[in-house]
Image (tube, rainbow, N blue to C red):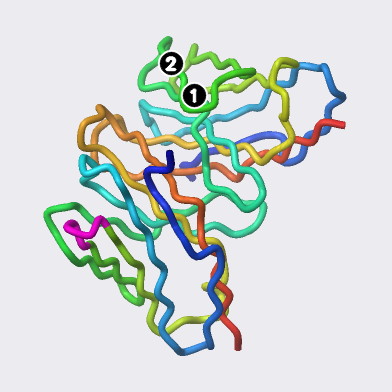
Amino acid sequence: DGGITQSPKYLFRKEGQNVTLSCEQNLNHDAMYWYRQDPGQGLRLIYYSQIVNDFQKGDIAEGYSVSREKKESFPLTVTSAQKNPTAFYLCASSIFSTYNEQFFGPGTRLTVL
Amino acid sequence: DQQVKQNSPSLSVQEGRISILNCDYTNSMFDYFLWYKKYPAEGPTFLISISSIKDKNEDGRFTVFLNKSAKHLSLHIVPSQPGDSAVYFCAACCGDNAGNMLTFGGGTRLMVKP
């Protein structure tokens, strides 16, 4: 079955620690995205990558970092510089062409204690 | 500055009736619009989309209407079912940006009562 997987589903970390969220897709999509969702709010774009070894900042990139070494993988690191990291994180992928929907993973709930 | 807005945070309808979810946008360059459905603690799933060359797109119980002059789109669900209870996000795309960047609204929570 093709799809997007994110792990873990729930993640707890102490304040000041970096943490990496995993995102893998086997849809052969070129583009991948990371979003953050806070309670009662929409999805805000953190980073996106349209091709391997290239990525761009989204609207709220401060305190986050990404890498795109493989087409299938787009991990997100939440660094200690992120002031309010507790949120629901969603990864998505799409064909890199206009007028196509993005497919989302199940999300990771990060709680910083 | 929110470019895509869903002004109703929640909506409650009776099973079997019509649900109408609204979305407004400000960027006239947007030319492709999508609706996603999201259950708690899950990723959004794509529902339906519409290109700006159309004013209506229908898929089963779901119909999206686009009014370009008003920069407004709406999602109609007929008949509504309890399983439709979820948060619905509208998203807008494309136009002057390369690739497939989506701008999302804040979502509307739909509750369908049996």
Q: Secondary structure at mark 1?
A: strand
Q: How many marks?
A: 2
- Can you say whether B50 is above or below A77 in the image? below
Q: Residue at x 28, y 60 (%)?
A: B72
Residue visible at 49% across and 42% down in the picture = A3
Q: Position of residue A99 (x, y in %)?
A: 24, 42
Q: Which residues are magenta?
A: B67-71
Residue drawn at x 63%, y 27% as measured from the top left: A22
Q: Is residue B45 above or below residue A95?
A: below
Q: Residue B23 in the image: x percent, y percent?
A: 37, 59
Task: Check residue B70 for magenta coloring.
Answer: yes
Name the mark on residue A55: 2
Residue located farthest toward the left when viewing the structure as drawn:
B53
> At 44% from the left edge and 25% from the top edge, which residue is drawn?
A48
Q: Is residue A52 above or below residue B68?
A: above
Q: Left or right? Give the position of B12 relative to B3.
A: right
Q: CA distance from mark 1 to mark 2?
A: 7 Å
Q: Is residue A79 above or below residue A45?
A: above
Residue neighbourhood size for the residue with mark 1, other residues' Cα within 10 Å, grouped as few (<14), some (14–19), many (≥20): many
Give the residue number, with chain letter if any, for mark 1.
A47
- Is most of the magenta stretch helix, strand or loop? loop
Could you say where residue B95 lies in the image, as x and y percent from the top left? 20, 37
Image quadrant in which the N terminus of chain B is located: top left
